Image (spheres, rainbow, N blue to C red):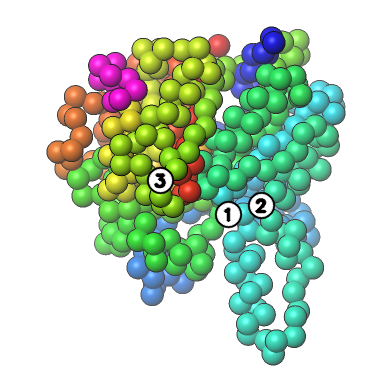
């Protein structure tokens, strides 16, 4: 069967370090930390009192007041990043056949803020069920994909993907396959997450997953540092337009890069801890390389899952050295979560965007906040600490892993 080639023709980004693609890229290359004290609720009694919030996001930039009230924050930002991507690609306004345009949009958790508000309001009452009629449609995590399609009139395949923190990488893979198999000409894909709330922060604190470095939030996300103590929660939304190459060429679209391959595996090991030998991570990278028809030596940059947890960082690096062997020492590795925090279901897409821009600009964004070498990590590995590195990036690989043992990987290459 002839598989179609798939390219990226549009990008939108709302992140803790920039509310557009260019702002986000400037933040990555500038080594900007998106972490600060939480403003979205009173976190004074919480173990972690900081996060990587979106800064200066105004839903009324994208929606009218009546519309905005009917949407959870995760859907508001999904529509914002999607609007950016549609405008960037030029697929709006009848430029393409809407029956052949799909939407595959992810979230790890969905409308947690709405869920929390509604349950608290009910608990405060006398037991009479007075729920907002928009409660369920605001909360369910497929609703962002639905609203994107309705907003732009896209009538192709439409669904959500959820695999915890691997969600939006899985969404990219599904979108990629829809086009390869000729089920659509264009797919808007990505993911959004907005769960910086009492329930979100309190829940992850209870699991002991997050950093508690309240005296120094800006440097709390420390992937590969000896003293890392957990991730910082982030909120973000990213959208990318995937397109059949022939279709893109026929309409004269600008092309950022080509999607080379993708993979998905399971650890089948533990609810939250990674496989200690990085088995699932190793298998997912091998699967993506095989799908792309590439050799390990073809990869120049890896954007790692790198959440800044003691176990996770070690397991992923072990997987990288197992897969890439001696070539691992020629690759640039970085965790952009050192700047954005961990954006959960949106992590995969904003990190894929970092890879796309690295391929386009031949520049690797850094891992910031490195203070002390970890003796468990091979010093010959190039973690791109503190400063971006200029180099030819022919192909970049992005890893994302989620609670439940989900692993997803996507490879982008120069067109």
> Does 389 sit above or below residue 106?
above
Dot 1 or dot 3: first in sequence order is 1
Outermost residue to the bottom: 126
Residue 150 visible, this orientation = yes
Q: Residue at x 70, y 48 (%)?
A: 142
Task: Give residue 141's mark.
Answer: 2
* Local secondary structure at mark 1: loop
In three-dimensional space, the C-alpha distance between marks 1 and 2, rounded to whole angstroms, equals: 7 Å
Task: Give residue 269's mark.
Answer: 3
Task: Give residue 150's mark.
Answer: none
Q: Residue at x 73, y 65 (%)?
A: 135
> Does 264 sit above or below residue 138?
above
* Local secondary structure at mark 3: loop
Decide which of 215, 203 is in the foreground and name it.
203
Camera-side mark, 2 or 3? 3
Dot 2 or dot 3: first in sequence order is 2
Decide which of 195, 218 is in the foreground and name it.
195
Q: Position of residue 366 (x, y in %)?
A: 33, 32
Q: Position of residue 171 (x, y in %)?
A: 61, 36
* Range covered by the magenta-colored residues: 321-330
Question: CB atoms at circles 1 and 2 under 8 Å apart?
Answer: yes
Left or right: 66 as drawn, with respect to 363: right
């Amino acid at each position: 069967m002839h598989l179609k080639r798939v390219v990226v023709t549009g990008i939108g980004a709302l992140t803790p370090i920039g509310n557009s693609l260019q702002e986000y890229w400037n933040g990555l290359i500038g080594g900007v930390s998106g972490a600060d004290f939480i403003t979205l609720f009173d976190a004074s009694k919480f173990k972690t009192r900081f996060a990587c919030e979106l800064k200066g996001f105004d839903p009324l930039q994208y929606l009218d007041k009546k519309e905005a009230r009917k949407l959870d924050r995760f859907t508001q930002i999904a529509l914002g990043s999607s609007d950016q991507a549609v405008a960037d690609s030029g697929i709006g306004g009848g430029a393409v056949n809407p029956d052949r345009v799909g939407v595959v949009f992810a979230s790890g958790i969905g409308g947690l803020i709405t869920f929390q508000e509604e349950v608290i309001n009910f608990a405060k009452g006398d037991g009479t069920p007075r729920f907002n009629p928009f409660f369920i449609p605001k909360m369910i995590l497929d609703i962002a994909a639905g609203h994107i399609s309705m907003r732009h009139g896209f009538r192709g395949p439409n669904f959500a993907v959820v695999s915890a923190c691997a969600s939006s990488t899985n969404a990219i893979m599904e979108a990629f396959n829809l086009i390869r198999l000729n089920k659509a000409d264009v797919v808007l894909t990505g993911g959004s997450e907005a769960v910086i709330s009492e329930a979100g922060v309190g829940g992850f604190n209870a699991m002991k997953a997050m950093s508690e470095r309240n005296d120094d939030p800006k440097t709390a996300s420390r992937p590969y540092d000896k003293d890392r103590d957990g991730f910082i929660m982030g909120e973000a939304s990213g959208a990318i337009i995937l397109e059949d190459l022939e279709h893109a060429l026929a309409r004269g679209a600008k092309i950022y890069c080509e999607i080379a391959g993708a993979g998905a595996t399971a650890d089948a090991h533990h609810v939250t801890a990674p496989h200690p030998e990085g088995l699932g991570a190793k298998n997912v990278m091998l699967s993506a390389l095989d799908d792309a028809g590439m050799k390990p030596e073809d990869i120049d940059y890896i954007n790692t899952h790198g959440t800044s947890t003691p176990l996770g960082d070690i397991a992923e690096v072990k997987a990288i050295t197992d897969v890439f062997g001696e070539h691992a020492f020629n690759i640039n590795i970085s965790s952009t979560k050192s700047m954005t925090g961990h954006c959960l279901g949106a992590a995969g897409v904003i990190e894929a965007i970092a890879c796309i821009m690295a391929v386009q600009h031949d520049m690797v964004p850094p891992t910031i906040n490195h203070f002390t070498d970890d003796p468990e990590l091979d010093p010959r590995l190039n973690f791109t600490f503190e400063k971006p590195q200029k180099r030819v990036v022919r192909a970049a690989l992005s890893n994302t892993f989620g609670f439940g043992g989900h692993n997803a990987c996507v490879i982008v290459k120069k067109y």
